[in-house]
Amino acid sequence: MNRKFSSEPSASEREKGIAFSGPNAFSEGGAGQRMLVNLSWLIKLRWVACLGQLLVISVVIYAFQVELPFLPLGPVITLTVLTNIGLVAWTVRLSQRREQQLPTSDTLLLVVMILDLSSLTALLYWTGGPNNPFSLFFFVNLSLAGVLLPRVTAVIFHFVGVICFGLLLFVHRPLLVVAGVEMLPPIYTIGQGDLRHFGLFIAFLTCSSVIVYFMTRLTGELRQHELDLRQIQSQKSKSEKYEALGTLAAGAAHELATPLSTIAVVAKEAEAMGRSQALPDELCEDLSLIRSEVERCRRILNRMAVGAGQAIGETFGEITPERLLQDVLIELQKVINEPLGIDLDQASKSEAIQLPPIAVAQALRALVKNAIDAVPSGGPIRLTSRLESRWTLVIQDRGPGMPEEILQRVSEPFFTTKAPGSGMGLGVFLARSVIERLGGQIRIESKSRVGTTVTVTLPRRQNTNLGV
């Protein structure tokens, strides 16, 4: 038997637990789109690099009359061109797939950038190593890594870059230069490194570390800012939907109450008149059925009004968790088969918290009612209250639990596993709205044939300028 839930907040986690505190991190599709943007920029930069390398080699050979070994340089540039063509084809293929299927791994970016770093190292090896002024382009690659790659992979790339520059200090092919100009010889030709080698390596290591550190930190903060902005926008959108739903439910309850009352009065008078005039029993039974169904509609509308409309705009007040739980359980006495186990710490009995008491009580009542409905045989239900930096309430039952497919849908409004007429699928949906708007969190953990645990956390103090 499935746990009878009217509506709950979010999708299940790995261990069938659900945390409700707003959206978490980039979505899979969003990360895939970010990767496509990064790839497109990298492709453009690689085309610029290929053209620039060909232009520089041509200028050095024909304008400065410096002999360069074009035979090994050409294949290196050709390899970059071919891999960039392949990268273009791969990007086009990705862009044609559905957004949710885009990969989110940065491994491809890391591999391509390491390939470019290796190509730069090879070009510098044949053209003077650290004596080549274009060895400064190591810092361009490191800066790109800090922008495009996550911190861990950027650090790996930095480590590879330091190794490549160290190899160039140890071995490279010197260029033919004007006599009298002192060049930095490869370490292997002189047998050991001198102060110039050591100083240049330390300078490169220091500069590259600073660049990678600050670039990764800056881009990390920008990504976190973007994530926070998305969370705020998503939460605002959800709050607006909850308020619209609550207003609609309360308005419907108000507008339909009068005609239903009129129908109930007319049906009662017709039933009384029919019995006094000895009308057929079937007709009297139909009139009685109309009255009962009208009363049922009124009860549903009352639940909608209380659950959705009356809590909106409530002011904040001071109340102890013990008193709040008493208010929650008073209206549940008729459906409680056995006394509930309540465990309160001393702070929950003596210290007050600030919240809108009616709205929060209604939200908690929906959660407790679901626990009661989950164990119709009167099994044990336990409430545990702890008041520390935040107030934590744990509602635990030993019912049949919920399978994963139910957990994945419990956040949907009007979703219910209860029998027709027993639940509307709005109770816990609206409870989620109240708890989250107060800066709280609802977490649900459930296992089949074991039971369900609902953990509610709320801050002790609220910004009283916020409404519920």
Image (cartoon, rainbow, N blue to C red):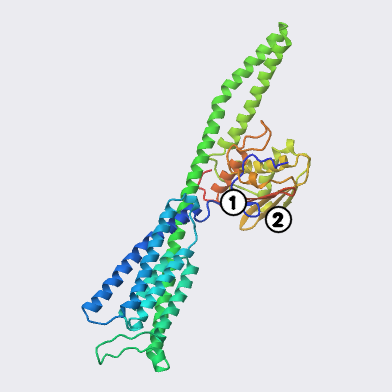
Instruction: Name the one closer to the observer, 225 or 385.
Output: 225
Mark 2 residue element: helix
Q: Which residue is mark 2?
A: 346
Image label count: 2
Q: Residue furthest bottom?
A: 191
Nearest to N terminus: mark 2 or mark 1: 2
Q: Which residue is mark 1?
A: 441
- Residue 82: percent from the left, percent from the top? 38, 65
Q: As shown in the figure, which amino acid type bears the numbered disc 1?
A: Gln
- Residue 351: percent from the left, percent from the top? 65, 53
Residue that appears at 58% across and 41% down: 412
Residue that appears at 61% across and 58% down: 389
* Left or right relative to 406: residue 160: left
- Residue 60: percent from the left, percent from the top? 25, 78
Which label sits in the foreground, 2 or 1?
Answer: 1
**Residue 202: in sight, yes or no?**
no
Q: Residues within 10 Å of mark 2 (few under 14, many from 20)?
A: few
The quarter of the rendered structure image containing the N terminus is: top right
Cα–Cα gap, marks 2 and 1: 23 Å
Q: Residue furthest front?
A: 71
Q: As shown in the figure, which amino acid type bears the numbered disc 2?
A: Gln
Q: Residues within 10 Å of mark 1 (few under 14, many from 20)?
A: many
**Residue 51: in sight, yes or no?**
yes
Instruction: Name the one closer to the observer, 147 or 213.
Output: 147
Q: Is residue 260 above or below residue 87?
A: above
| Mark 2–mark 1 CB contact (< 8 Å) | no
Mark 1 residue element: strand
- Residue 81: percent from the left, percent from the top? 36, 66
Q: Residue furthest top?
A: 277
Q: Which label sits on residue 4?
A: none
Choose top left, top right, bottom left or bottom right for residue 157: bottom left
